[in-house]
Amino acid sequence: MMSEDRRPQGPPADGLTVGRTAALVGVSVKTLHHWDTIGLVRPGGRTRAGYRVYGDDDVARLHRVLVYREIGVPLAEIGRLLDDPGVDAREHLHRQRGQLVDRISRLRRMVGAVDRMLLESKPGIRLSPEEQVEIFGADWQPGWADEAEERWGSTDQWAQYAERAAGMSAEDWKAVAATTEALNTDLAAAYRTGVAAGSDRANALAERHRALISTYFDCTYAMQVCIGRTYITDRGYAAHHDAIEPGLGRWLCAVIAANAGAHGVDPESATWE
């Protein structure tokens, strides 16, 4: 059993050791030794065993040093600010605060510039989220493009889309949006009036649909059939078409399948090719 005089001692009553002080203020022991050497902050107390320790005033001075260092004041000037009774530290902090506000404004402008560069260098739609909503409508969610990339980013068709989209201007996207809206209007009208899948009018609409998809990548009849299936099986696509006209997605799937069949593609066995 450990004797009384050899039991571990608790923290010294007359101050903190270098290690504990470093942990308290968030710097390294090496830093504290350096600041001690240059006279910036010196431990002002000693333990009964003769070890130098930091008292409350020393720790408070350390915190002031950290504040000045954080705002970019050189160590030599920090020492002068802390030790010169003729220096108005509060006035100096106000001046430093103004400089920090200016720096924050510059950094924000730099972040904005970097964001624009990232947008311009990213494959796909080179439009800001605000521009996307303005062009594609209030229901458009900019995150859809990221979801699509996550799902199809490894395909040849996505690479083709990314290359084409990167060369499109805002005016080009406005034209695509107008074409899409016109097609949806005509599809809804045809569905409401009972246009039958396989009819000339339905086939013409299917061809317009395939041409629109081919704006992004070369869409075969088999690919179009696969896309048409998602208008039934994918909840998001089904809801999108139902919002245009209830039941439109299922009808459009049938229209696409019938037109593909007229071009030698079996819609039942069509695959992505």
Image: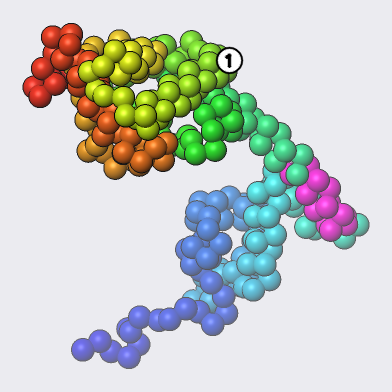
Magenta stretch holds residue 99 = yes
State the residue lying farthest toward the right: 86
Q: Is residue 104 visible?
A: yes
> Could you tell me which residue is drawn at 22 percent across and 18 percent down?
198
- Above or below, comparing residue 20 to residue 204 in the picture: below
> Magenta stretch?
87-100
Residue 110 picture quarter: top right
Q: Quadrant of the N terminus?
A: bottom left
Q: How is the image coloured?
A: rainbow
Give the percent coordinates (x, y) of residue 156: 26, 15
> Could you tell me which residue is drawn at 24 percent across and 23 percent down?
197
Q: Tell whether 13 sits left or right of 246.
A: right
> Could you tell me which residue is drawn at 56 percent across and 68 percent down?
52
Magenta stretch holds residue 258 = no
* Of 253 and 114, the residue lying toward us: 253
Amino acid carrying mark 1 in the image: Glu
- Above or below, comparing residue 213 to residue 234 in the picture: above
Q: Is the magenta stretch mostly helix, strand or loop?
A: helix
Disc 1: which residue: 171
* Of 40 and 265, the residue lying toward us: 265
- Above or below, comparing residue 150 to residue 172 in the picture: below
Give the percent coordinates (x, y) of residue 39: 68, 54
| Disc 1 residue crowd, few under 14, some 14–19, many 20+, Cα 10 Å | few
Give the percent coordinates (x, y) of residue 231: 28, 33
